[in-house]
Amino acid sequence: MINGKKIAVVLPAYNAALTLKATFDEIDHDIVDVVILVDDYSTDDTVKIANELGLIVIEHDQNKGYGGNQKTCYKTALEHDADIVVMLHPDYQYTPLLVTAMSSMIAYDVYDFVLASRIIGPGAVKEGGMPIWKYMANRFLTAFENLMIGYKLSEYHSGFRAFSRELLDSLRLDELSDDFVFDNQMIAQIVCANFKIGEISCPTRYDEDSSSINFRRSVKYGLGVLTTSIQYRLHKNNIKKYSYLEPLPSPATEY
């Protein structure tokens, strides 16, 4: 716990056997109360290793996609009474050492949502080995989103994120894509609901054992990002409404 807040780390996994233990070992287990792995129908030993490490393991009986995996992650974390949920990829691309800092930013009510940015800091991208085409796409899409959404983030595409329980309880996650654009749609929801957003600089690695979507899937994701940004602008300008951008109604007060 931090400041009396229960912390859950969720690991959306698909064929993460080679990197899972390294990721798990760098999590600060003195402050993290529960670690949950959701396996999206892996074909390697991800589940076996997760069980050996003592994680809470949820197995999908079919591949539900990156967004579908996250939906199970957040639902399970909330069922375990988490006050703060940190989503960390088990492919060891992002450093787990930042879990404590990101959780603290929420535990002390500075932010509701924290993104670990690969862009902040001199040389962060080059040293991590991000392919140049990914970097250029990241810069173009982020500029477009900052313009259309009216917010200013260094990037919208990091897969390392921390959330408050209140935030997760207020979003229509079931209405979002089961594919990679889920991440982007979620940020649009968060901005639309006026939650406080923070960023922290995060070193990353792009080695052979770290997962990465191919060029074709990246193009599909990019088109999804553009669509989400346009939908957000249409929604905010009351030109066309999208239900997924509306926050869930607050529970009725009982007297």
Image (cartoon, rainbow, N blue to C red):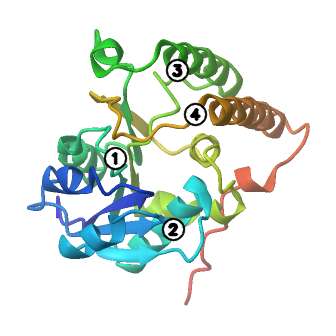
Disc with the residue nearer the chain's start (4 vs 2): 2
Residue 114 image point, x, y percent: 38, 41
Marker disc for residue 134: 3
Q: Is residue 147 above or below residue 43?
A: above
Under mark 2, the amino acid is Tyr
Q: In terms of secondary structure, where does tag 4 sit?
A: loop
> Mark 3 near mark 2, Cβ–Cβ under 8 Å?
no
Residue 90 image point, x, y percent: 33, 52
Disc with the residue nearer the chain's start (3 vs 2): 2
Under mark 1, the amino acid is Asp
> Mark 2 near mark 1, Cβ–Cβ under 8 Å?
no
Residue drawn at point x = 22 percent, y = 41 percent: 98
Q: Is residue 141 above or below residue 166?
A: above
Q: Mark 1 points at which residue?
A: 91
Q: Quadrant of the N terminus?
A: bottom left
Residue 66 is left or right of residue 147, and the answer is left
Q: Is residue 249 above or below residue 255?
A: above
Q: Distance between the residues labelled 4 and 2?
A: 19 Å
Residue drawn at point x = 61 percent, y = 15 percent: 140
